[in-house]
Amino acid sequence: MIEGLLSGLHGVLDPRNFLAVVMGCLVGTIVGVLPGIGPTGTMALLLPLTYALGPTAGMIMLAGIWYGAQYGGSTTSILVNLPGEAASVVTTLDGYQMARQGKAGTALAIAAIGSFVAGTLGVVGLTLFAPPLANAALSFGPPEFFWIAILGLLVLSNLSGRSTPKALLMATLGVILATVGMDPISGRPRFSMGSSSLFGGFDFVPVTMGLFGVAEILYSSAERVKSWEVMKVRFRDLYPNREDFRRSAAPILRGGVVGFLVGLIPGPAAVMSSFVSYGLERRLSRHPEKFGHGAIEGVAGPESANNAATAGGLVPLLALGLPFAPPTAVLLGGLMIHGVVPGPLLMQQHPELFWGVIASMYIGNCILLILNLPLVGVFASITRVRPAIVNPTVLILCVIGAYAVNNSIFDVWVMWAFGLLGFLMRRLGFEAAPLVLGLVLGKMLENSFRQSMVILEGDIWGFWARPISSTLMVLAILALVMPPVIRIFLQSRPKHTS
Amino acid sequence: MGKKVEVWAAVLSLIWGLLYLLAAMEYPMGESGSPGPGLMPCLLGLIYMGLSAYLLVANLSGKKIGSADQGTESLRLKPLWRLITILTAYLVAILPLGFAFSTFLAILFMSRLMGLEGWVKPTVLSFVTVILAHLLFVVALDVPLPLGAIWEKAKG
């Protein structure tokens, strides 16, 4: 493990990889600061750039955008009362109140320091947990992979949307889209409608760019524009006093542990962890009444938790090839477009990538601390850039990005069609993340099912005979059944008490 | 977002699922020990139709299932339609006019539509974006962006 980590650190110091870390952290911070397009959309937009960077540097950059956005998100939450990123919503409660009391610098500094400490703790957890989990999963065969894919789709569908049936419908649609193109076993084209452009199926990049990037811009162009005022913060204000540090130390450490553990659970981990941490700090505080009125613990805990959660979220992705959150679904897609199959074999087949991504996060956290403390004023001023400048530029980037996949205008039309679909989906309350995950996991799901049936000689009960497969099957059934059962139980409880 | 729209969306989804299922049945199903290319699509079609039917029934019975976005009634549809028109025209124009010229025009009109005042600022933004995109994608990353049929014809 130490050897792998050291070789990963050595790899990150390669100029290309180092540039990818810096770029990812910088773009992530900017995206975190800017309300609107989030880290998932930005990661999707920059997927084509990974062709030029290669898989290792590409993944390092994409991961940097994800955890970098958690740092940046706090800036506008504190200074403008406007969360740049969903995971920073809870920071507005106390962060903005601190800013109004003239403690904006303290809040920003504690958010950055907490993010750094907890982010690093999270990466230590990732370093310790991912390799043994990947080793344990080496004995997996097609039946296990089939149930892993089912489990991934079910858990993300349960937690990412406002409605499980709608999310499941989207996940199924994603798998359906994955059936378009050449059948990998018989070599026969399916659902291509005679178009040679569809023989290869729907490319992940234009679909994701359309659903996340174009749909978001269409939506924001139709929304009424709000104006906001950014509070000014001076560099000399960025020094918390001893009392601030004393009050923040325990929430930061607790936030790190809570965030990492929530990150391991499927769902929007960064958002959930910040709320869990806020609730925990409020419960543990001797002065819970101060929460919502500028309590520094209300900034330190959640901002630490959302950073640690990103490291936790990478454990199932790197060890099992299972994306438990929308940004990890994009990372998974990014690996697959480079022909890298994520899963238990990733650590053995691509150690430079596996350890490179982990090592880059140690360095990335240091870079983010350096970027976010002295340059906080610069990043805050980014919110003044008008959507009239940002949105057309992002749309053009989407068009070029989609075109660059195969140098084909067909992919651009695919992106546009999925952009319109994404807009309609949002209007109707459907989430895009399960669709993308279905598209990514669809081929693996079908191939592993068909291979399993061949191995099991057509005996469907053979899935039960394999211990890991049956365990995963039980987990998948629980993931499907438990949420409605819990909901019914919770709905019936007030009736009993009344 | 009215309930009527959600009902229609579920109906369209159901019809789409049925069409997919019918198309999937054209492919061989294979045997249990060697499933063919049609088996998984058929199963998916059935699951998709089942979920669509559930949404339809739930919507018709007035059950609340993950409401549509809050505040969607206040969306401004006029600029949205204009943006859709500009982008569609842009995509149609890329191949005949070429990337540079069509992109210049697209950004010019999009930025004005999104609230950038006058003609000077949109023109500068369009010009700078086209130049930067060319330097990054064509020069640095070797992406062969379309030159334009008219330009290529003129070049002979």
Image (tube, coloured by chain):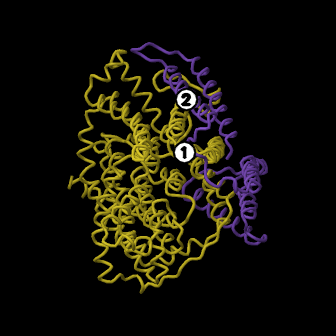
The chain letter corresponding to purple is B
Chain of the residue under the numbered disc 1 shown in the image: A
- How many numbered discs, if any? 2
Q: Residue drawn 43% across and 66% down?
A: A71
The shade of chain A is yellow
Q: Would you place residue A220 above or below residue A207 in this image?
A: below
Q: Nearer the viewer, residue A395 or A54?
A: A395
Q: Nearer the viewer, residue B143 or B56?
A: B56
Residue for badge 2: B48
Q: Would you place residue A146 above or below residue A492 in this image?
A: above
Q: Secondary structure at mark 1?
A: loop
Going by the numbered disc 1, the residue's amino acid type is Ala
Q: For this view, does A57 lie left or right of residue A456? A: right
Q: Would you place residue A238 above or below residue A392 in this image?
A: below
Q: Would you place residue A118 above or below residue A245 in this image?
A: above
| Residue furthest out toward the bottom | A236
| Residue furthest out toward the left | A2
Does residue B155 appear anywhere in the picture?
A: no
Residue for badge 1: A432
Q: Give the image location of residue B82, x and y in percent.
A: 77, 54
Going by the numbered disc 2, the residue's amino acid type is Tyr
Q: Label for residue A20?
A: none
Q: Give the image location of residue B147, x and y in percent.
A: 70, 51
